[in-house]
Image: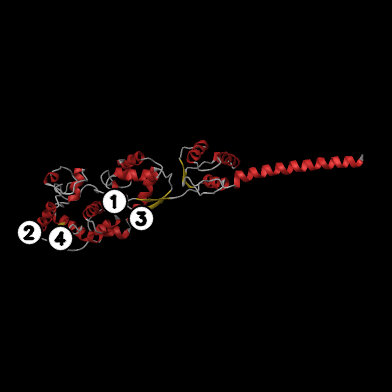
Amino acid sequence: MKKKKKKGLFKTLLVIVLVAVIAGGVIGYRYYKGFFKPNVTAESEYLYIYTHWDFEDVMTSIGELHAVNDTASFRWAANKMEYPSRVKPGKYKLTPGMNNRTLINKLGGGFQEPVKLRFENIRLKENLAGILANQLEPDSIAFINLLDDDSLAARYGFNGENFFSMFIPNTYEFYWNTSAAHFMERMHEEYQKFWNEERSEKAAKLNLTPQEVSALAAIVKGEALHTDEMPTIAGLYLNRLRKGMLLQADPTVIFANQDFTIRRVLYRHLRTDSPYNTYLYRGLPPGPIMMPSIAAIDAVLNYQHHDYLYMVAKDDFSGYHNFAVTQAEHSRNARKFQQALNERNIMR
């Protein structure tokens, strides 16, 4: 009897051990599957989490993107790691094969991928707003509302016409969920860094404010196809300003007409009444006709000293210009270029 009892007890213990092992294995596999098994797919490079989103919004996006193979295990792990209470907006890099634990630590910690934001060669505020909206969370309307806000411009030391000169074209690093207001603040900080003591002193020697330098640099940028010619062009317009002459810059006429398809400025274009038309109004326009490049701004500040007052594009269409001191010399250069336009049938 004792032997039978011992044998029965042994079987019972064996069953208990086997059940415990199986249960432990099931639990262990669940934890492995929930936390450590590779789960992130290669179907989406980034996961964007918007500012107003909650955990269910994140789950919906993950499902739509097929960002993970097993959404149930992700949800289980997220709840275990208390992620639903610490959802943070941002742009998050998804690495194929990443497990739930690593991904949730990234999302919950807000370890997002910075955006390298670059803008240059921008003509209008609307263009800038569109570029920003393509790379940051706020939509273009949010940016336009601030770009058109005269009170905000005044707070930063600008007005509605020259506010565009606050934006120095370059490459900047932002987080994707940067607000439109914070973007403006950062751009003002970058503007102040750019207009350091050296640049400010050079502007003062020209009897120009930084905003006026930008307005002139925008014209230089509009005229020059080649950076190495910018200081010469800048010197020409500074000569005209000092003599009280009309600048007569074709890019300002194109801007005044708001027709950026114009290739040949005609007399009818010159009659457009606008403070930006430097064929009609003396001095600099009230603001930049485009976002001036750093090279154009520095070309104005470090202009070439010469006596040129006139220029016209070369008739070889190289993008360079013929410069002249006298009206007579300029007229000869202009006739050559006009003839070249006619030969190529460029009428507008």
Which mark sits nearer the N-terminus, 1 or 4? 1
- Across and down, in percent, residue 38 comes to 57, 47
What residue is pinned by disc 1? Answer: 121
Given residues 193 and 218, the one toward you in this image is: 218
What residue is pinned by disc 3? Answer: 193
Q: CA distance from mark 4 to mark 3?
A: 35 Å
Mark 4: amino acid: Phe
Q: Residue at x 34, y 52 (%)?
A: 191
Instruction: State left or right for residue 199 relative to residue 103.
Output: left
Residue 291, placed above or below residue 318: above
Mark 3: amino acid: Lys
Which mark sits nearer the N-terminus, 1 or 2? 1
Q: Residues within 10 Å of mark 2 (few under 14, many from 20)?
A: few
Given residues 194 and 85, the one toward you in this image is: 85
Q: CA distance from mark 2 to mark 3?
A: 45 Å
Secondary element at image label 2 = helix
User: How many discs mark residues in the rendered view?
Assistant: 4
The answer to whether the residues at label 4 and label 2 have Cβ atoms under 8 Å apart is no
What residue is pinned by disc 2? Answer: 328
Q: Residues within 10 Å of mark 4 (few under 14, many from 20)?
A: many
Colouring method of the image: secondary structure
What residue is pinned by disc 4? Answer: 323
The answer to whether the residues at label 2 and label 3 have Cβ atoms under 8 Å apart is no
Q: CA distance from mark 4 to mark 2?
A: 12 Å
Q: CA distance from mark 1 to mark 3?
A: 21 Å
Which mark sits nearer the N-terminus, 1 or 3? 1
- Across and down, in percent, residue 275 comes to 18, 45
Instruction: State left or right for residue 290 relative to residue 186.
Output: left
- Across and down, in percent, residue 72 comes to 57, 38
Front of the two marks 4 and 3: 4
